Amino acid sequence: MTAPKTLYDKIWDAHVAHEAEDGTCLLYIDRHLVHEVTSPQAFEGLRMAHRPVHAPDKTIAVPDHNVPTTLDRANAATMTEDSRIQVEALDKNAKDFGINYYPVSDVRQGIVHIVGPEQGWTLPGMTVVCGDSHTATHGAFGALAHGIGTSEVEHVLATQTLIQRKGKNMKVEITGKLRPGVTAKDITLSVIGATGTAGGTGYVIEYCGEAIRDLSMEGRMTVCNMAIEGGARAGLIAPDEKTFAYCMGRPHAPKGAQWEAAVAYWKTLFTDEGAHFDKVLTLKGEDIAPVVTWGTSPEDVLPITEVVPAPGSFKGGKVEAAQRALDYMGLEAGQKLTDIKIDTVFIGSCTNGRIEDFRAAAAILKGKKIKDGMRAMVVPGSGLVRAQAEEEGLAQIFIDAGFEWRLAGCSMCLAMNPDQLAPGERCAATSNRNFEGRQGRGGRTHLMSPAMAAAAAITGHLTDVREMM
Amino acid sequence: MDKFEKLTGIAAPMPLVNIDTDMIIPKQFLKTIKRSGLGVNLFDEMRYNQDGSEIESFVLNKPAYRNAEIIVAGENFGCGSSREHAPWALLDFGIRCVISTSFADIFFNNCFKNGILPIVMPQEVVDVLMSDANKGANARMTIDLENQTVTTSDGQSFAFEVDAFKKHCLLNGLDDIGLTLEKVASIKTYEADMNAQRPWV
Ligand code: SF4
């Protein structure tokens, strides 16, 4: 009998194409996602070496980081020159190398981590990489997915493999049920709060437990998306009937007899009884509250009912970091989190730009108006999410409430396109990073769930969504 | 990466010490989406006036050295920022070999990754090579990587040291990707197996 294996062990073992004597492996990559910012030098490298893309049919590209999300974006003047050059370079590279491509003009265009699953490129048991740290998102399908650098992008393009050493196994279990008003975003932020941003370094996390099983695929993607903010190489959730139901019928999912064979294989993808984890963290679902971040690291997270912490309450280097964070954020220790006023709301990103996120936000906003003077935008994760939200009447709810209803892209998740915060502006954001300057130089970001962001848009300050339900 | 076996070419003398990567390629050229095309801006500030015209006295602007493939340089070549744009710019101009008494570490390694051979020689040898380079276009130097020798235009030969693994990679034109491609048979076998086992992938 073979030793019991974790889900990570199983996927890893199934993808080792070559192992050197020192344990360095060539890991075979099933899906390589590509966007415009981290790929141009990689394609250039191929050209200079006269190398083709090894598996163009397994390579999928979409521009997302740089593209404007305003309705007039077909007009090239909406983009800065260096952004336009990067997008045009991707257009050309996709064509020259014959890879799958969703240009800005295609209704299926969107954030690379939303498009992959939506089109059925991401499937259980696969290895998925992208020159982007939030590739961990795809782990929600029980796929081993992680971000890579530009030189590795070139390596994968040329060889369809990655030179890798195996990481360690970590289990994060969320037991029991979540309370009303608590979402996947609150789970993933609370886990980072518990482990710290380096707690997962060197590990691949498997999320499990009843509260994780109960999540939809959208919710599971939100959880895995932020595995990287906890320092982990990747996050994984074992596939189940919900996973299969999500994949079935997607354009690039298998059909007919192949579908049957695939599901039979996917059903073997779980952690065996008694398999070894190097580290374990358990949280009770009922202990998790709706949370917000107060500082400039995703680990600076607290239940919305709390107050801004005093730097002195931390230990070691974190004391200075917390003080710096409070200065940057313009906050005082002891201030109630619900007293923090905001002037901008951003609902979107690869963390929370899917249909279920919009349903949750719209449920809070229905029949209400955002606070006077508030700048609020909803940015769908893909053109198809946008179309569905329009069909379900969600778009109208946002528009009636006073939100801008945008086209798909990364938008205000990072200050690389025209959607940015001005210095000192304070934003309730559903994205994944609250670093200094992330949403614009001097901009202040509070991370939270879509429902919490919607509540803040109405009241004008950070708000406990449970009071509005 | 192109193979480096034997090179006979013009050597440009650059006796200046501490030529840093900012001098090799100034930072305003880093916004590019490319690795190629940097050759025109190689040594930009030493090579061009403000108005874009060439500075005649700069060695690579002199008719004799416009097609140089080798640089004989002063000590500590390639210091400063770690930008890989520096070897990219040298390569794009056509430089395949730099000889000096010493190199900055990161630059030295970046050269090998890009098919450029950096050679460390003692001062007295660099002095001989520098005066050979000063002879201009008719004096061609020969670099023989296999036998690890540099030969001047008048036939004087000097041996140099090179790391065996790096030599192997250069001789065969192997970078990380090249090395992985040496295992392409394993990759192909894996793909064939997987096509049978998991045809939907
Ligand atoms: S939405 Fe934000 S985190 Fe996600 S891929 Fe785009 S920039 Fe990165």
Image (cartoon, rainbow, N blue to C red):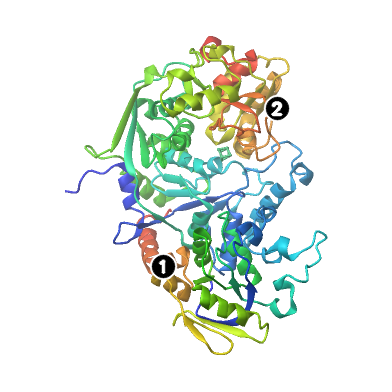
Query: Which residue is at the far left?
Result: A1
Q: Nearer the viewer, residue B76 or A165?
A: B76
Q: Mark yes or no: residue B177 visible.
A: yes
Using the numbered discs, state the Cα–Cα distance from disc 2 to disc 1 in whole angstroms: 51 Å
Q: Quadrant of residue A433?
A: top right
Q: Is mark 1 within 8 Å of ligand 1?
A: no
Circle 1: element type: helix
Q: Is mark 2 within 8 Å of ligand 1?
A: no
Q: Which of B193 and A297 is in front in this view?
A: A297
Q: Which chain carries label 2?
A: A
Q: Nearer the viewer, mark 2 or mark 1?
A: 1
Residue depicted at x 68% and y 15%: A371
Disc 1: which residue: B184
On the same chain, marks 2 and 1? The answer is no
Name the residue type under label 1. Val
Q: Nearer the viewer, residue B11 or B4?
A: B11
Disc 2: which residue: A404
Residue depicted at x 59% and y 49%: A35
Circle 2: element type: strand
Q: Mark yes or no: residue A97 visible.
A: no
Q: Which chain carries label 1?
A: B
Residue B74 percent location from the top left of the image: 58, 68
